[in-house]
Image (cartoon, rainbow, N blue to C red):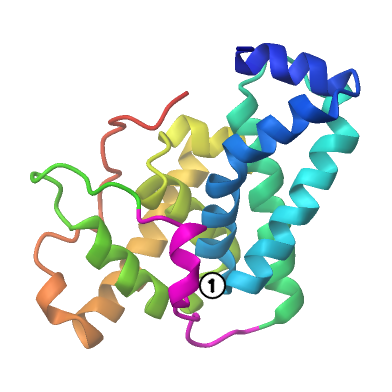
Amino acid sequence: MRDEAERIRAAAAGDRDAFDQLVRAKRERVVRTAYQITGNLEDALDVAQGVFLKLWQGLDRYDPARTFDTWVYRITVNAAIDSLRSKGPKGMMHALPDEAAEILPAPEKRTADERLDLGSLQAAFRRLAATLAPKQRAAFVLREIEGRTTSDVARILDVTESTVRNHLLQARRILRRGLERDYPELIQGFGDSEDRDDRGGGS
């Protein structure tokens, strides 16, 4: 069975079967990330379709010295932000429909010593994220929900690590105010002044 690097090379050379294997491997992550940013499953599926079209058209320009997942995340985040901005203010983010479970299986919960349960965070985030600027939302999704390191997020967003930390600081402050108002039971331990340590998420 071909590894990912071999599939990328084959797909870049026009092997559609190899590309389909890449799509199957990345689709869940792409749709989930796009959904967390756009707040709408239909928009997320549209974003994913565009992302994979762009990948198919641009694989011959992919630099294997770069991490493939980071490249995919960058395309996904940029497309999701463009979609979000094109829609204007959304208000409350849409809840996932029941049939989305097969497309977006819930990510594994983090360890017990995490300050905020990931499932609870996601539920609150879906309600409050409309108050975040697109780059703040993207940084928060990548760092806190997708579990990418700060350096990964900086590469994906094509900004400095200090800019990522600033986005995260502002996002946490905005979300904290929303949590205090709407979800007081979740507020204990929700930090707003420090970047969380970079456990996991790098690839």
Asked if residue 99 is among those painted magenta in the image, a careful observer would answer: yes
For the N terminus, which image quadrant? top right
Q: Is residue 37 left or right of residue 195?
A: right
Residue shown at 54% from the left, 37% from the top = 154
Q: Percent x, y for residue 159?
A: 61, 40
Q: Position of residue 34 (x, y in %)?
A: 59, 58
Please say whether residue 80 is one of the residues in the magenta stretch: no
Mark 1 residue type: Gly
How far across and how far down the image is residue 18, in percent? 75, 25
| Residue stretch rendered in magenta on the structure | 89-106
What residue did someone put label 1 on?
39
- Relative to residue 124, is residue 86 drawn left or right? right
> What is the magenta segment's predominant secondary structure?
loop
Quadrant of the rendered structure where residue 70 is?
A: top right
> Looking at the picture, does residue 76 appear above or below residue 72?
below
Q: Residue at x 28, y 46 (%)?
A: 108
Note whether residue 153 is visible. yes
Residue at 83 percent of width and 27 percent of height:
59
